[in-house]
Amino acid sequence: MTSNETLIQLEYIDKVKKILDLKRQELKRPLKACVTTFGCQMNAKDSEKLCGILKECGFELIEDEQSSDLVLMNTCTIRDNANQKVYGHLGVLHHMKKKNKDLKIALCGCMMQESSVIEKLKESYSFVDLIFGTHNIFKFAELLYRMYTEDGMIVDIWESTPEIVEDLPTVRKYSFKSGVNIMFGCNNFCTYCIVPYVRGRERSREPEDIVNEIKNLVADGVVEVMLLGQNVNSYGRGLKESISFAQLLKRVEDIEGLERIRFMTSHPKDLSDELIDVMASSKKICRHLHLPLQSGSNRILKAMNRRYTKESYLALVEKIRDRIPDIAISTDIIVGFPGETKQDVDDTIDVVIKSGFENAFTFIYSKRTGTPAAEMQQCEEGFVKEQFDRVLKTVQETARSKVGGLEGSICKVLVEEKNEHEEGMMTGRMSNNIMVHFKGDESLIGKIVDVKLVQSKGFYYFGEEVV
Ligand code: 5AD
Ligand code: SF4
């Protein structure tokens, strides 16, 4: 629903446009902006909204920072190396700004929600022009206006917001697929995780708003949507209408012209039988489930506040594979959580082997200030590296043997892009999220084609289009 706030922001877009028109006339050239995104799909989606506003304001969007008049970094803070990358890059931007005084530098995203970061930026990076957080990205046009009309660093960080502002402009990176937010924030407070502190409490979007957005996307050529939330299985809590995630999926399935539905992320503790049933009987929901394990040790799972056990996780995987035999399951694993022992890691490895993950993202635990795990006794670095290598080896072996099994079969592939490494090759994705490279041309982008899987390369395939 178009709200008052949307109308206010549209007015600010007009005001910024006028300022930029004058600048453009003065410089006798277009004004360019570059948005760099760190982190997850949620951030990628936010960046599309930010780009939409920049474009409406009159910026040409480019990927080269060097020729930009405005550089915006949408930051992530899930692990400390994400923060380090931003500080490192700010050094480069400072250098650019010394040469070009008119260059505007803006920062937003999860890292900006940490007060220690803001203090550091104010003290040591005073050349930054605009800083805002995750809760007020809908105010971007207003903040741009302030940046161009006020002196000094503009900092606007909100602790939270109950508001979900709809109907602001957006641009899409891909013409044929799109992420769609179904909820924001997280209430789970896994003890290692900073997300609940920087993205706030869980809020679901109204089902009609979601369905309408997808209908519009489909009318605009989108065939695949990815429903986005930190914990999609708890979708619907707090809405007036009683609706579960599985019921939302059914409504999305009914949208004519939509071919594929993906979603992420599912928390194992909330994955219902109803959802498994809806997936099993669906023609559009992709045969892929991302089900973060984090650890296979009951002791560590408890300390992480994950609220499931090794046994219940394995039973869930078995139930899903039983009901949906062609499903691929991927996962996230953290190694080196405080107090973790070799035996705990043995348990994780055991779950990896028993679950037979088709794909797994393995992370070294990163201490995040303000989370409960930061106060716990930390593991020794050398030990963690050794354990990480052990897990990674198992994860790779398991995925290789699982993914390789499809050689010779014919699969539907959504063609996504030109293969960057090989001329004349295209890259697409099967329903189970596995990538396939095959001969073809750009006219296939956005189409779903039949491809015979000729050769397995471990985590991906080489194939041939079947016409
Ligand atoms: N250290 C390492 N990995 C983390 N993740 C979340 N917080 C941390 C942390 N502090 C991982 C989890 C999550 C994924 C998105 O990032 O595995 O599922
Ligand atoms: Fe972080 Fe846990 Fe919420 Fe995922 S479910 S965002 S890991 S707190």
Image (cartoon, helix red, strand yellow):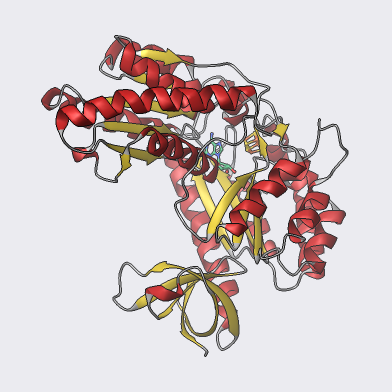
Residue shown at 29% from the left, 45% from the top: 62
- In depth, the one of 93 and 180 nearer the eye is 180
**Residue that appears at 41% across and 66% down:** 417
Residue 411: percent from left, percent from top: 59, 80
Residue 265 in sight in this render:
no
Q: Nearer the viewer, residue 60 or 455?
A: 60
Position of 368 relative to 66 (above/below)? above
Q: Is residue 451 above or below residue 145?
A: below
Judged left or right of residue 295, residue 139 is left
The answer to whether one can see residue 143 in this image is yes
x then y, percent, for residue 374: 55, 24
Numbered label tally: 0
The quadrant of the rendering that contains the N terminus is top right
Q: Residue furthest left?
A: 99
Left/right of residue 244 with respect to residue 211 in the rendered view: right
| Ligand 2's quadrant | top right
Q: Position of residue 259 (x, y in %)?
A: 65, 67
Q: Quadrant of residue 437?
A: bottom left
Rendered location of residue 378, percent (x, y): 52, 29
The residue that appears at 57% across and 25% down in the rendered structure is: 7
Q: Residue at x 29, y 9 (%)?
A: 151
Relative to 351, 38 lies left or right = left
As drawn, is 353 to the left or to the right of 255? left
Above-or-below relation of 215 to 429: above
